[in-house]
Amino acid sequence: MSQQSALERLSEDSIVIAFDYGLKRIGVAVGNLLTKSARPLRIIHWKKNDQKWAEITQVLSDWQPAAVVVGVPRHKDGKPNDMTPICERFANQVEGRYGIPVVREDERYSSVEAESYHDADDDEPIDDEAAAIILDQWLNKVPGENNENH
């Protein structure tokens, strides 16, 4: 879904969930259009597909977001990398399973930025913080006067 068509469905106070998708962990963040801010929510640790989808279903049920933002990684030059099609597929699955508008956001430097907030000795996963950075990036692109008709 394009950013524009996703925006058309959102109201000024819409809640948005972001996912930083990984093969072992999924970072989750929540934000809203009113404050245009995001915060880390949780990390989904998964090994089996059923477990992953059960936890995603719970997050979406708890928060009832108007849209979802999925980070899509790319190489520095913007070309797809090995994870690009995997994240695109995940975004398509979320859209298809839940009928929620899903926006893809370039996440090239989100993990690097999230790591910069941590001690070098800290081994804690940062996927939720990366998801918040991805969501902040997207929220910063959303016009302030969006959806005046809603």
Image: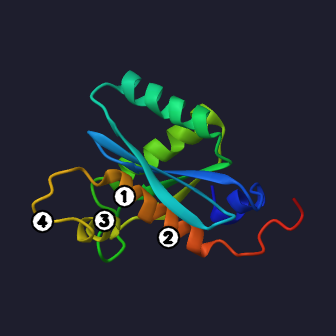
Q: Are marks 4 and 2 in contact (CB under 8 Å)?
A: no
Q: Amino acid at mark 3?
A: Ala
Label 1 vs 2, first from the N-terminus = 1
Mark 4 packing: few (<14 Cα in 10 Å), some, or many (20+)? few
Q: Residue furthest left?
A: 121
* Residue under pointer 3: 114
Element type where label 1 sits in the image = helix
Label 2 vs 3, first from the N-terminus = 3
Mark 1 packing: few (<14 Cα in 10 Å), some, or many (20+)? many
Residue shown at the point (31%, 71%) measured from the top left: 113
For marks 4 and 2, give the one nearer the viewer.
4
Label 4 vs 2, first from the N-terminus = 4
Residue 90 vs residue 150, the one in the foreground: 150
Label 4 vs 1, first from the N-terminus = 4
Left or right of residue 38: residue 123: left
Residue 137 has which mark? Answer: 2
CA gap between label 1 and label 2 equals 12 Å
Mark 2 packing: few (<14 Cα in 10 Å), some, or many (20+)? some
For marks 2 and 3, give the one nearer the viewer.
3
Residue shown at the point (36%, 44%) measured from the top left: 26
* Residue under pointer 4: 120
Residue shown at the point (60%, 53%) measured from the top left: 16
* Residue under pointer 1: 129
Element type where label 2 sits in the image = helix
Q: How many marks?
A: 4
Residue shown at the point (38%, 51%) measured from the top left: 85
